[in-house]
Amino acid sequence: MKHLLNTLYVTTPGAGLRKDGQSVVIEREDSPPGRVPLHMLGSLVVFGGVWVSPALIEACASAGITLVLLDRNGRFQARVEGPVSGNVLLRRAQYRASDSETGTEIVRGIVAGKIANQRAVLMRARRDHPAAGDGDPAPDALRQAAERLADALRRTRGPELSIDALRGIEGEAGQLYFSVFHHLVRVETNGVFRFKGRTRRPPRDPVNALLSFLYTLLVHDCRAALESVGLDPAVGFLHRDRPGRPSLALDLMEDLRPILADRLALSLINRRQVCAGDFQTLDGGAVLLTDEARKTVLTTWQERKRDNRRHPFLGESAPLGLVPHLQAQLLARHLRGDLDAYPPWMWK
């Protein structure tokens, strides 16, 4: 099984990265230099004004270490990578599938996995709530939402469904899931973490800011996983092709979002690892994480990726950080004809 390599995140403005021997050296004005061996890294992600030496860029490209440049708010800017792995036959199979019945069945699996995991998140939260009858509307709201998600999951099995119909079911389920998401925030914070619905580009409240940041991290991991098996991240099935958009990476992350990102966001809030002072509101209403809060989230993200879970299809335990790679491998096997269907990752 593939080893879980680390992602090095550098968030300090003005920091410098250079190559020294077979290591990355991180230089900051306020602390001694840090050093990370190159062989331990799978990718390098830098935020904002961080200097990267040409020698390090060359070494990363040669070693297959992806360098991702984000602005200080976590928005994607650029990506530097070496030669593309894989072979043309796999990518041709991917392109054919995107315009065929095979693509419909892949979308069916992705949507079913996402809805099942959204329902699992709500059911877990409902078990944690007190019983109905004490004036708390959350248990009933979560139960009703879970029942409607179960119905949406059943509808994905319709044999005559088109990709557009499956997209409609996925959108309906997403709206339902986020309509009760505020019940999953269990701490009283004077309305700081009040959630009224999903907002993006830009996020309009702290919960959305946290979700968007975690989704950015997850889509990076999914893109790296797809490239590692030789698939084209730009050609997806559920997400339509659009210039500059990693549609297949967005597909791959859909059934992983509720477990890897949404639950982690709730954990950070409910355990008070983030608070009101960890967010800033810009002119225009965009809400973003502060630099220090990003470090907290990144540390927790890396820790969560080391948690082991049993893969429902493979029957083996693996770190959560390897799940995108395992799913990418399963998708590649399906496209090659080694698997009859693409098995989504479902949380149990």
Image (spheres, rainbow, N blue to C red):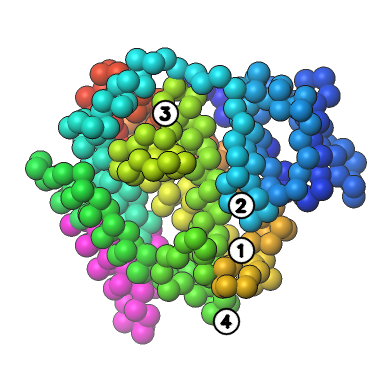
Disc number for residue 288: 1
Which is more N-terminal, label 1 or label 2?
2
Which is more N-terminal, label 4 or label 2?
2
The residue lying toward the viewer, choosing from 279 and 6, is 279
Residue range in magenta is 123-151
The residue that label 4 is drawn on is: 190
Disc number for residue 51: none
The answer to whether residue 232 is left or right of residue 27 is: left
Which is more N-terminal, label 3 or label 2?
2
Tell which tag, 4 or 1, sits nearer the viewer.
1
Q: Secondary structure at mark 2?
A: loop
The residue that label 3 is drawn on is: 232
| Mark 1 to mark 3 CA distance (whole Å) | 31 Å
Q: Are marks 2 and 1 in contact (CB under 8 Å)?
A: yes
| Mark 2 to mark 1 CA distance (whole Å) | 9 Å
Q: Is residue 243 visible?
A: yes
| Mark 2 to mark 4 CA distance (whole Å) | 27 Å
Question: Mark 2 packing: few (<14 Cα in 10 Å), some, or many (20+)?
Answer: many
Question: Mark 4 packing: few (<14 Cα in 10 Å), some, or many (20+)?
Answer: few
Disc number for residue 74: 2
**Amino acid type for the residue under numbered disc 1:** Leu
Q: Is residue 330 above or below residue 137?
A: above
The residue lying toward the viewer, choosing from 120 and 207, is 207
Which is more N-terminal, label 3 or label 4?
4
Question: Mark 1 packing: few (<14 Cα in 10 Å), some, or many (20+)?
Answer: many
**Amino acid type for the residue under numbered disc 2:** Gly
